[in-house]
Amino acid sequence: MAQELENRTILVTGGAGFMGSNFIHFLFANVPGVKVVNLDLLTYAGNVRNLEGIEGKPYTFIHGDIADAALAAKLFLKADYVVNFAAETHVDRSIHKGAADFVHTNIEGVHALLEALRASPNVKKMVQVSTDEVWGDLPLGSKKKFNEETPFKPNSPYAASKAGGDLLIRSYVKTYGLPVIVSHSVNNFGPRQFPEKLIPFFALRAMKGESLPLYGDGKNVRDWLYVDDHSSAIATLLKKGKAGDVYAISCGEEYANIDIAKKILGILGKSEKLITFVKDRPAHDRRYSVDSSKIRALGWRPRISFDEKLKETLQWYSENKSWIKGVIKNNTNINSHISLK
Ligand SMILES: NC(=O)c1ccc[n+]([C@@H]2O[C@H](COP(=O)([O-])OP(=O)(O)OC[C@H]3O[C@@H](n4cnc5c(N)ncnc54)[C@H](O)[C@@H]3O)[C@@H](O)[C@H]2O)c1
């Protein structure tokens, strides 16, 4: 897989979070000789335990902020490729706790990375991991899909801050010809996801026999991609993606939130009576649907079915109680607001 990446040094930012850590595991499992440097600020969402299992691999952890321009510049000098997963990622936090951290990391942080890239003679490509949420939402029942040409219409402060970073990248690509690719993925799921996000949030509550609070009528639709399929999409972009281009990543498995709740309850053998309906989130996007034919033309495909991996993901959470305890111990306010990405 990805011979271009063999024996290379990849700087992964935000590699102690959900998708970044799974990407690092993916690299060590699939790319011979790869070396990884992980720059992570270890915010509430970062967890060094997410890297358990890579002991003995050529891996360096740097505790720091992507917005630290001097640090970013230093690390870019030694990297062949960069993938930026570092971000503030939770929509509800951006609504209820203010957007300052989102602006700092998702815009100022991206700016520092771009300046570091300008000064680096070595980095061949950087991938900015963005989201489908920058495109706003689609009506339920419509056949429309977002694609790389869709104009940005973000509805949450989180999505707006990601769009801000993406626009800054566009300008640096146009102005300075920097080799950056922006990827826009749909919702990811899998092991090591912080339990404020829909699937682990519902799973952990269901395991304890607690209610599953659904926003509004529960009919908001998301497309779900297993995190390893996202990792292989990023590896494909590093290897074959055109520098300066934008790529949408999707699975095509679209489910309403209420269907996800029912699937989780079914797997865990719990009653659907645990489902409760609560006041909707402000500006709650109704439906995301994404056309990923551009990255599929590079040979990438999602390999993994939702139902199969949902079972395994729930199994992972039930087998990793000490991981959950650690995460909750350090974040006592985890359930203080309802969380549906
Ligand atoms: N989770 C999803 O479903 C999803 C879907 C599409 C796109 N994305 C994007 O993928 C990326 C990763 O998402 P995730 O769910 O793994 O996030 P996460 O919240 O699990 O992890 C974010 C990581 O970034 C680190 N971080 C935050 N601010 C930092 C800073 N200033 N400097 C260095 N590190 C910092 C945190 O410590 C944490 O380890 C984000 O950019 C997100 O916007 C996520």
Image: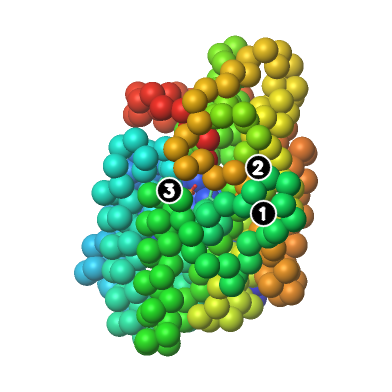
- 161 or 269, nearer to the observer: 161
| Residue at the (43%, 67%) spot, across then down | 166
Q: Mark 2 and mark 3: span between their CA atoms?
A: 16 Å
Query: Residue, x 62% and y 31% (percent of image)?
Result: 218
Indicate the position of residue 339 as horizontal and vertical percent values.
Answer: 48, 32
Residue shown at 62% from the left, 52% from the top: 138
What number of labels is visible?
3
Label 3 – label 1 distance at C-alpha = 17 Å
| Tag 2–tag 1 contact (CB < 8 Å) | yes
Tell me whether circle 3 and circle 1 mark residues in contact (CB < 8 Å): no
- Residue pointed to by mark 2: 221
Instruction: Name the amino acid type tagged 2.
Output: Val
The residue that label 1 is drawn on is 289
Look at label 3 and name its amino acid.
Answer: Ser
| 314 up-or-down from 74: above or below | above
Res 12 → quadrant:
bottom left
Residue 77 location in percent, x, y? 33, 77
Whether residue 56 is visible, yes or no, is no
Mark 2 Cα shell of 10 Å, populated few (<14), some (14-19), many (≥20): many
Q: Earlier in the sequence, mark 2 or mark 1?
A: 2
Could you tell which of marks 2 and 3 lies nearer the N-terminus?
Answer: 3
| Residue 182 makes an appearance in the image | yes
Instruction: Provide the secondary structure element on which disc 3 rests.
Output: loop
Left or right of 256? Residue 118 is: left
Tell me the residue at 70%/16% (across/down): 272
> In the rendered structure, which disc, 3 or 1, sits on the residue that comes first in sequence?
3
Separation of residues labelled 2 and 1 (CA atoms) = 8 Å
Q: Nearer the viewer, residue 208 or 90?
A: 90
Colour setting: rainbow
Report the disc number at residue 156: 3
